Amino acid sequence: MIRRESLTADGRSDRAADVNKERENMMRLVNYAMSFVRKDEGQDLLEYALLVALIAIAAVAAVTLAGNQVKAVFTAIAGKIPTT
């Protein structure tokens, strides 16, 4: 079976039109990605978020490591509180 390509209104074949459409879509994607990379407004927010996450991890690690000592302090304080 022989496949014949039909021509578009401007005289190009369907295949050439499809290739051009794919090329245009790819260029839009590349331009969008490049504009996303160039924008640096979100970088500050990301840096602050990473800093907060690092501080939270350090706080959890410190509480975990000092857990028994903190428990002993609170137990001693609770023992000194008079009950009614």
Image (cartoon, rainbow, N blue to C red):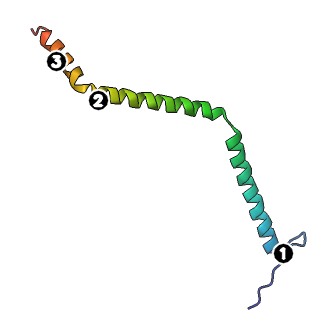
Tell me the crowding category of disc 2: few under 14, some 14 to 19, or many 20 or more residues within 10 angstroms, Cα based. Answer: few
When asked about the image quadrant of residue 59, the answer is top left
Residue assigned mark 2: 64
Q: Which mark is residue 13?
A: 1
Q: Are marks 1 and 3 in contact (CB under 8 Å)?
A: no
When asked about the image quadrant of residue 20, the answer is bottom right
Q: Real-space Cα distance between discs 2 and 3?
A: 17 Å
Residue 43 lies, in percent from the top left, at: 61, 34
- Of the numbered discs 1 and 3, the one sitting upstream in the chain is 1
Viewer-nearest of discs 2 and 3: 2
Q: Is residue 72 left or right of residue 43?
A: left
Residue assigned mark 3: 75
Going 21% across and 25% down the picture, which residue do you hit? 68
Which amino acid, mark 2? Thr
Q: Real-space Cα distance between discs 1 and 3?
A: 84 Å
When asked about the image quadrant of residue 41, the answer is top right
Q: Indicate the quadrant containing the N terminus: top left, top right, bottom left or bottom right.
A: bottom right
